[in-house]
Amino acid sequence: MKVRLLKTTDSGFADFVSKVLDRRGSREGDVEKRVEEIVSAVRQQGDRALFRYTQMFDRVTVTAATVEVTQGEIDRALAQVSAQDLSTLRLAAKRIANFHKKQLQKSWQYRDPIGMILGQRITPLERVGVYVPGGKASYPSTVLMNAMPAKVAGVKEIIMTSPMGEQSAIILAAAKLAGVDRIFRVGGAQAIAALAFGTASIPKVDKIVGPGNIFVATAKRMVFGEVNIDSIAGPSEILLLADESAEPAHVAADLLSQAEHDEMAAALCVTTSVAMAQRIQTALELQIAQTKRQTISLKSLTKYGAIIVARGEAEMVELANAIAPEHIELIVKRPEKLAAQIRNAGAMFLGAYSAPPLGDYMAGPNHVLPTGGSARFFSPLGTYDFLKRTTIIHAEKKALRSLAPKITHLARLEGLDDHARSVEVRFNK
């Protein structure tokens, strides 16, 4: 198959970009109705509903005695994982921890000239929930990327839920290395509801992080406000900007690395050269024939893949900022120069050797990134997501007295006389 080749001047170009940005799909009516039923049932019935839905959807029977993974199970899992696998996980964990330590914020205060001490106190959340997809697939990197920033931030208790599948040993090993405190073998919307509201078995958390399918994403959106969440994650995406210096085989391989995620993934390349676009088309055609996840990649590329020919570098940048991709890769002669013009992206990969899988696994920055254009206002998951900021105001009498006329004036402008009197009573003898 040949991935579609589009010019930005083509009549269907704008519609195609809109289709890519609109593929999140977490507001489908049937899904919302079903998830609302699940969330409501778990909120009202607790474990009874949680266990019932786990049996219904995952075909797994859990009870109050078996829903939590025991320390013995974790120890046996560690013994099953190969030394090479453990070594790889440890290296990834170390690099992730080192990067996220740089993000730590500190409390601060200063003394105002009129006699006030003003400041901000930084405190970690008490308890967070990490959701990890399960079933047939296994994502130990997801465990590390979601749990380790919380650990670095100083969160007191990290709770993990996952529908444990056939490859649970590597997931449990990653959880142990990441500092997860308790693990529960439940998944889906019912697990999100249990974390949000608490049940007899699963404690209520302050924030839920982690990716999942449309049911998980919809449940996270529904419980937001009862707890905090990281974001509503959508399908993966990459926008790759390439000039005549790019190696087509590298471009094709990087596009396929995202297309293989799932059928909803979007793999886009933008170049200013028709000849380069055609060479990338040919490289993709050759490589996709050799991929193990060919069926998924073909569907992804057919629906949401494209090689786009822009009219110049300025239009490439304009398009990148409009799409606000999860991953943006710059395989160009001067990537730093071009990167300075990119405002909206989850993660930036500069140069031919900054392949996206480097960021997915080993570089250190988080791979939990904003999708579906939300990089316009969302940031990657980080240590700061697990920290609260509290403002501090400590005023001396002279400080309040000096600002009292202005405070009372503003209060009465808003019709709030008691606000004004709250200040005046301190000085009216």
Image (cartoon, grey):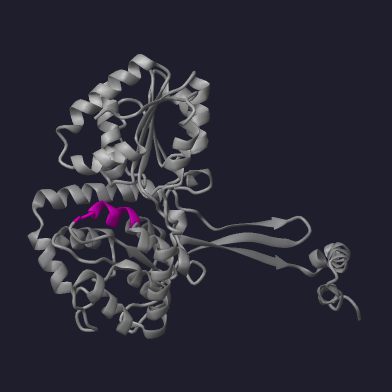
Up-down relation of residue 385 to residue 427 (above or below): above
Query: Quick check: can you spot residue 346?
Result: no
| Residue that lies at the very extreme toward the right in this rendered image | 429
Image coordinates for residue 271, horizontal then vertical, percent: 40, 22
Please provide the residue range marked out in magenta: 137-146
Q: Nearer the viewer, residue 142 or 179?
A: 142
Query: How many numbered circles are shown?
Result: 0
Image coordinates for residue 179, horizontal then vertical, percent: 28, 63
Q: Residue at x 42, y 78 (%)?
A: 40
Say left or right for 231 vs 249.
Answer: right
Q: Nearer the viewer, residue 61 or 27?
A: 27
Say left or right for 124 vs 286.
Answer: right
Which quadrant of the view contains residue 117?
bottom right
Say left or right for 61 vs 271.
Answer: left
Which quadrant of the view contains residue 124?
bottom left
On the rendered image, what quadrant is the C terminus found in?
bottom right
On the rendered image, what quadrant is the N terminus found in?
top left
Image coordinates for residue 410, horizontal then vertical, percent: 85, 63
Image coordinates for residue 208, horizontal then vertical, percent: 40, 65
Q: Main secondary structure of the magenta part?
A: helix
Q: Residue at x 26, y 66 (%)?
A: 162
Which quadrant of the view contains residue 191?
bottom left
Up-down relation of residue 214 to residue 198 (above or below): above
Q: Is residue 297 magenta?
A: no
Q: Residue at x 19, y 26 (%)?
A: 286
Up-down relation of residue 236 to residue 35 (above or below): above
Q: Nearer the viewer, residue 394 or 253?
A: 253
Query: Quick check: can you spot residue 52?
Result: yes
Q: Residue at x 42, y 20 (%)?
A: 334
Q: Is residue 141 magenta?
A: yes
